[in-house]
């Protein structure tokens, strides 16, 4: 399992019904399994899925593949419905799972 | 006809950010979507981390990294020992002499992160390196290198960055050739790199010998570029193509 450095930017408070924007950056080792002459091939290890759930419900999911810029910047919006946990999950080749948690307080 | 070859006046030198596309400039200004900030945060963590040697962390002597405000505007500078050091090498010196650790190594992730974290504290502050006294000889050498024709293409730095600044080359705009954004996140690199790495890329472009990062020539050139950027504000960590 490799390290994942992340930056998540989102409001901490919102009024019910507000549309909030969530911005996410992540940095990963991204072993793309380049098979060069003279080098021992190594298995691919990239983040293949990124998903976000808010108050237990999935609000965003993205499949990632080679060909997407490294350290991609992602931004999406959701509607603030209730105070709850926003769970960010990155799934890596080989089965590792990285998570980050933020709390959104809705008044 | 006498206007065919125009020397570059100081007023022609424009900050690096003006050569970026509006999209890239907006992204550079917004830490929420600037991947360089991943390195800045990593550097700030390193700043607080105590080295295995038992010596104090960076923060143990210098306090909060916020106290590094303005430091990057003064580098490269001649050290007490008489050597010209840029910010990277100054960190390495502290690392080996005060912390009793092996240097991180030029272009290592740790050194780039720490440099980015320190340089970011000078964002928006004007460059003001010292070029008198012991630095004068280095500045003269840097000036010479800047206008030295080199490589198979036989081009000097000045022929692109003065004579053709603002025009396009290989799908990008030629800038005034300042180091204001370094260490910078370069899309081509998929990561953060030093000014010296960028200078090596330029050398490759004109098919000249690529010198080692941290070499005396690149340090002198860095001093010249810092003097050339005098009064313009630091953009580090920059975002470049």
Image (cartoon, coloured by chain):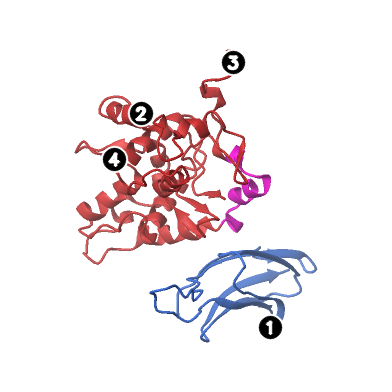
Residue ranking furthest to the bottom: A95
Are labels 4 and 2 assigned to the same chain?
Answer: yes
The crowding category of the residue bearing disc 2, from other C-alpha atoms within 10 Å (few below 14, some 14 to 19, many at least 20), is some
Q: Which residue is mark 4?
A: B216
The crowding category of the residue bearing disc 3, from other C-alpha atoms within 10 Å (few below 14, some 14 to 19, many at least 20), is few
Q: Could you give the CA–CA distance between mark 2 and mark 1, rounded to whole angstroms?
A: 64 Å
User: Dot 2 falls on which chain?
Assistant: B
Image coordinates of residue A6 in percent, x first then y, are 53, 67
Q: Could you give the CA–CA distance between mark 4 and mark 2, rounded to whole angstroms?
A: 13 Å
Residue range corresponding to the magenta coloring: B17-34
Residue B156 falls in which quadrant of the image? Answer: top left
The mark nearer the N terminus, 4 or 3, is 3
User: Dot 1 falls on which chain?
Assistant: A
User: Dot 4 falls on which chain?
Assistant: B
Q: Quadrant of the N terminus of chain B?
A: top right
Residue sitting at x 51%, y 74%: A32
The mark nearer the N terminus, 2 or 3, is 3
Q: Is residue B10 left or right of residue A48?
A: left
Chain A is which colour? blue
Is residue B49 magenta-colored?
Answer: no
Residue sitting at x 36%, y 28%: B144
Residue sitting at x 55%, y 37%: B175
Tell me: residue A24, above or below residue B36.
below
Q: Number of numbered discs present?
A: 4
Q: Which chain is red?
A: B
SS at mark 4 in the image = helix
Q: Is residue B173 left or right of residue B139?
A: right
User: Dot 3 falls on which chain?
Assistant: B
**Residue closer to the observer: B184 or A4:** B184
Mark 1 vs mark 4: in front:
4
Q: Which residue is mark 1?
A: A56
The mark nearer the N terminus, 4 or 2, is 2
């Amino acid at each position: 399992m490799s390290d994942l450095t992340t930056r998540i930017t989102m409001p901490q408070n919102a009024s019910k019904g507000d549309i909030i924007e969530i911005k996410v950056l992540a940095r990963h080792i991204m072993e793309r399994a380049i098979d060069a002459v003279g080098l021992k091939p190594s298995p691919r290890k990239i983040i293949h899925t990124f998903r976000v759930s808010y108050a237990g419900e999935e609000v965003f999911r993205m499949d990632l593949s080679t060909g997407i810029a490294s350290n991609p910047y992602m931004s999406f919006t959701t509607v603030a419905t209730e105070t709850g946990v926003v769970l960010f999950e990155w799934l890596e080749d080989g089965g590792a799972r990285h998570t980050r948690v933020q709390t959104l307080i809705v008044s | 006809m006498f206007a065919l070859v125009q020397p570059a006046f100081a007023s022609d030198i424009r900050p690096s950010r003006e050569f970026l596309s509006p999209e890239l400039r907006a992204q550079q200004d917004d830490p929420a979507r600037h991947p360089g900030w991943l390195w800045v945060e990593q550097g700030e963590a390193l700043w607080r981390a105590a080295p295995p040697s038992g010596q104090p962390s960076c923060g143990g002597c210098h306090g909060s990294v916020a106290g590094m405000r303005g430091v990057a505007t003064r580098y490269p500078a001649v050290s007490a020992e008489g050597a010209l050091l840029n910010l990277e090498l100054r960190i390495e010196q502290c690392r080996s002499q005060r912390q009793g650790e092996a240097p991180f190594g030029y272009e290592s992730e740790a050194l780039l992160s720490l440099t980015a974290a320190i340089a970011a504290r000078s964002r928006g502050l004007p460059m003001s390196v010292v070029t008198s006294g012991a630095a004068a000889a280095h500045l003269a050498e840097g000036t010479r290198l800047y206008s030295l024709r080199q490589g198979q293409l036989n081009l000097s730095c000045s022929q692109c960055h003065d004579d053709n600044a603002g025009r396009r080359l290989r799908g990008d705009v030629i800038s005034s050739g300042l180091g204001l954004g370094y260490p910078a996140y370069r899309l081509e690199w998929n990561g953060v790199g030093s000014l010296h790495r960028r200078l090596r890329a330029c050398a490759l472009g004109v098919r000249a010998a690529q010198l080692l990062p941290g070499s005396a020539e690149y340090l002198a050139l860095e001093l010249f570029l810092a003097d050339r950027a005098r009064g313009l504000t630091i953009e580090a960590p920059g975002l470049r193509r």
